[in-house]
Image: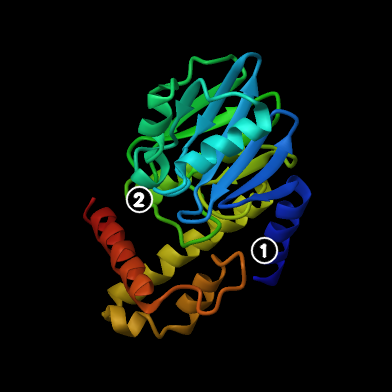
Amino acid sequence: MKYRKLMLWMCFLLFSNVVFSNEIIVQNVSSNVYVLTGKDYGTNIGLIEIADKLILIDPMPGETHFYQLDKTINEIVGKRPSYILNTHNHSDHTGGNAYFKSNGAQVLETSPIADSVQAIGVNSHSSKDTLYYLKGSNILFVGDVYDTSWHPTFYSGGTKGFNEAIETILNIADAQTIIVPGHGPIANKAALVTFRDNTNAWIERISYLHYQGLSTEMIMKDEQALTILEMFSANNKSPVLPEKAISRFIDRTISVVESEHKH
């Protein structure tokens, strides 16, 4: 657990030139790529310059911070976004689409923007997850398929969809690839492998306890399950999750397990 947290923190320091701009945190991760994070939602927003194009990925800094995000972008690159891409359609990632569209940006369902931006569809967190790989910079935006600030949310694709999505990322990435999760600190391939293994260990443990007849309340007291749960905290939070969130995570995991058991 300590190794994983240290590795994520080192990735954060290594890949980030962090600047705080009022309510927006700016990380310069390559010569033409920035990760901007609003404090309300913690959504990692991609800002990419390619030739004369300026691309935003998941522009949601919080309902009251669109102007500040727009201002920050202008301070960084001196122009407004041309295109918007979304890793999936949940509001904490698409909430800024309308604002930037009203200011001239085009929201794209796919990414025929440039050969250097590769879009890959998977089904894990949502039925229409899209990964965006920036070939020239070796940076991969993966949305909520991978979250380093919260527990995994694999409810759309289940165990199979989750593992296929992670395998897709691992097949694209190398040891130097910068992996930008939907929320939380920037990571790398080794951290993602650990996340995958912990997620599968969690599913296996909850499945075992559920079919042993344990209730959600009893599972919440299982030391092995709680130890696995701690592995998903990248910032040493204690407790890792509120009790309601733990209970909901167990219940939703059980729903996935039961659905897969029927098939």
Compare residues 191 and 211 and report the one nearer the observer.
Answer: 191
Identified at 58% across, 22% down, the residue is 54
Nearer the observer, disc 2 or disc 1?
Answer: 1
Amino acid on which disc 1 is placed: Arg
User: Against 142, is 240 above or below?
Assistant: below
Residue wearing tag 1: 4
Q: Secondary structure at mark 1?
A: helix
Determine the residue located farthest toward the right in the rendered image: 14
Q: Position of residue 105 (x, y in %)?
A: 45, 22
Amino acid on which disc 2 is placed: Gly
Compare residues 104 and 7 and report the one nearer the observer.
Answer: 104
Q: Secondary structure at mark 2?
A: helix
Query: How is the structure coloured here?
Result: rainbow
Quadrant assignment, res 5: bottom right
Tally the numbered discs: 2
Q: Position of residue 72 (x, y in %)?
A: 60, 39
Identified at 53% across, 62% down, the residue is 198
Q: Position of residue 160 (x, y in %)?
A: 39, 47
Residue wearing tag 2: 158
Query: Is 207 on the left or on the right of 47, as rendered?
Result: left
Query: Is 193 on the left or on the right of 95, as rendered?
Result: right
- Report whether residue 73 is seen: yes
User: Against 144, is 109 above or below?
Assistant: above
